[in-house]
Amino acid sequence: MSSVYHDMTESERQVSEYLTKLELDHIFQFPVFVYDDKDRPRVWTPDFYIPKLGIYVEVAGSKNFDYEYRKRIYNKNGIPIIFIHFFKDENRWKNYFIVKMKEFEEARYQEVMKMVVLDKM
């Protein structure tokens, strides 16, 4: 990842280093196809993609950007993404990240269990 550090903001670099510490391989600005609010096809590049987990990460570094719009579009397209709001509290984002990863994994587990129950019927 060090070769792309020059393209990252300081907060993106910190998140990248944390993902590396967690031994989570990640890809910087991996493109994802979405349909926007008017159903137009778009290609967006969230800050990171974690292939092992199938989760994207967006480092929200500015108060002046409409992250809610992005959240709606990712949700509409069924794309699992964690928004890390670095500007809100730099000291708690790591805990928030872990909690959100657990939530995604628990939701996936629940979906698998539904399939298991239906298969037994």
Image: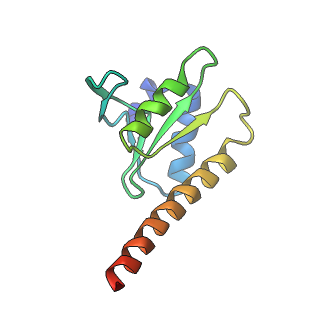
Q: Name which residue lies at 44% across and 74% down.
A: 113
Q: Is residue 2 visible?
A: no
Q: Name which residue lies at 39% across and 43% down.
A: 79
Q: Nearer the viewer, residue 34 or 62?
A: 34
Give percent across and percent down for residue 51. 36, 53
Is 75 situated above or below 97? above
Q: Can residue 16 be seen in this view?
A: yes
* Quarter where residue 7 is shown: top left
Q: Is residue 11 left or right of residue 24?
A: right
Is 40 situated above or below 92? above
Q: In the current view of this chain or complex, which residue is farthest to the top? A: 64
Number of marks in the rendered image: 0
* Quarter where residue 116 is shown: bottom left
Its colouring scheme is: rainbow
Q: In which quarter of the image is the C terminus?
A: bottom left
Q: Nearer the viewer, residue 45 or 69?
A: 69
Give percent across and percent down for residue 80. 44, 46
Q: In the current view of this chain or complex, which residue is farthest to the left? A: 41
Q: In which quarter of the image is the N terminus?
A: top left
Q: In this view, does 111 lie to the left or right of 93?
A: left
Q: Name which residue lies at 54% across and 64% down.
A: 106
Give percent across and percent down for residue 115. 37, 73
Q: Which of 103 and 10 is in front in this view?
A: 103
Q: Name which residue lies at 64% across and 18% down.
A: 63
Q: In the current view of this chain or complex, which residue is farthest to the front? A: 121
